[in-house]
Amino acid sequence: MKATKRSMGVTYAIRDILLPARELEKHGAEIIKLHIGDPNKYDFETPRHVREALCRAVEVNDNGYAESEGDFELRRAILEKEKQKNGVEVDLDDCVITTGVTEAIQMVTAATVDPGDEVLVPGPGYPTYTEFTRFFGGVSVPYHADEANNWQPDIDDLRKKITPRTKFMVIINPNNPTGSVYSDKVLKEMTDLAGEHDLFVISDEIYDLMTFDGVHHSPAALNKDVPMILFNGFSKVDLLPGWRLGYTVFRDPHGKLDEIKEGMMRQLRLRISANNPCQMAVIEALKGPKDHLDTMNQKLKERRDYICKRINGIPGLSTTRPQAAFYIFPKIESKHWNNDQDFVLDILNNCHVLLVPGHGFDEIYGKMHFRATFLPPVETLEKAFDSIETYMRKVG
């Protein structure tokens, strides 16, 4: 029996690279895992008042299904946040709750992309957009982000990539994997370009409150006319990755997205609902204190500064300085390796440090790079990069 070509074509470098690491672990190796963006795997803890809210929710909730679109009170709290932070004012029906942002990406892509359609994605960028576009028969078209300009999108390149088959433009800001924060000027130019070509914009803002240098601005706050779909959630900023809750907001002043929204609503009803008690509890994450944010961002900034200094001090590597999130995307300048996959596997086997090959974030603009997370404490990062530096100096 054979699986479908579409399912066998799915790749996800962030998790796929874990497979060879597990083989080493079977033989007793201790692997320092810098591959995954899960704060709770390190010294970051879900705020107590949010955990307690989940316990209460389990007791008072009937533990049955929620509404397919999501809990009413939670959606109202989300829209209040979006109004205060981004100036987005929409109706309750324009906001839905999903099982993480991943489900939102899948559903919007399914509602939009027919075979042969094209989607503009950042290069490098989060691979789920590319994979779901391919899964539904579309073609992801990466637009260049300029490493020399701290990974800001290249507007001229983006303009050249638009064709009659283009359906929408994806903006990931702050960016995964580079940690860049796009300037207001660049965001305005991108959204103006989308409006000029009658495209809608997906704005992925999951790291919006995890910034160190500058402040995140949503493109929805900078362009009021272009239809946009905002993706956000609770995995990163609120330290709730395992709860798998995200949300989607349709900002569509002229009703151009009505049919796409209906296509998503039909899928939401088909899958019944997102986790009900977690939806009730996460209201506390929105409305309650966010005392953890300053401490979290200060720790991340210190670790960012450390990892930048270490990487730029290793012959054969160089990196820009991330402005947000908790990823770094260094360049492999050494000629010892032919490609980034070989580099990452070599480092894994010889240094027992797990990184993600850069081509997993784009085959063109991600090659000869790797992604690492700087979530671990400095002591762990020091151990990892001591090992990497020793090995790279030895091989030359």
Image (tube, helix red, strand yellow):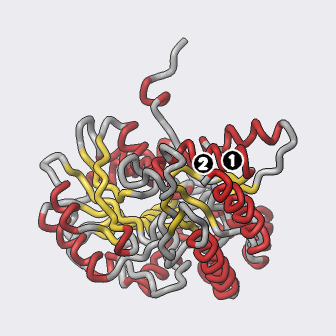
| Residue of label 1 | 348
| Location of residue 349 in the rendering, given as x and y in whole percent from the top left corner | 71, 43
Placement of the C terminus among the 4 image quadrants: bottom right
Q: Secondary structure at mark 1?
A: helix
| Residue of label 2 | 344
Q: Viewed as shown, does residue 305 lie left or right of 252?
A: right
Relative height, residue 3 to residue 376 (above, below): above
Q: Amino acid at mark 1?
A: Leu
| Location of residue 19 in the rendering, given as x and y in whole percent from the top left corner | 67, 38
Q: Amino acid at mark 2?
A: Val
Q: Viewed as shown, does residue 99 lie left or right of 361?
A: right
Q: Residue at x 42, y 71 (%)?
A: 173
- CA gap, disc 1 and disc 2: 6 Å
Q: Residue at x 50, y 76 (%)?
A: 321
Relative height, residue 293 to residue 262 (above, below): below
Asked whether the residues under the numbered discs 1 and 2 touch, taking CB atoms below 8 Å apart as contact, a structural biologist would say: yes
Q: Residue at x 60, y 61 (%)?
A: 372
| Location of residue 74 in the rendering, given as x and y in whole percent from the top left corner | 56, 71
Other-residue count near label 1 (Cα within 10 Å), few / some / many at <14 / 14–19 / ≥20: many
Other-residue count near label 2 (Cα within 10 Å), few / some / many at <14 / 14–19 / ≥20: many
Q: Viewed as shown, does residue 396 lie left or right of 88?
A: right
Q: Quadrant of residue 293?
A: bottom right
Question: Front-most of 71 and 169?
Answer: 169
Q: Is residue 260 visible?
A: yes
| Location of residue 161 in the rendering, given as x and y in whole percent from the top left corner | 19, 54
Q: Which residue is the extreme one toward the top?
A: 1
Q: Secondary structure at mark 2?
A: helix
Q: Residue at x 38, y 68 (%)?
A: 147
Placement of the N terminus among the 4 image quadrants: top right
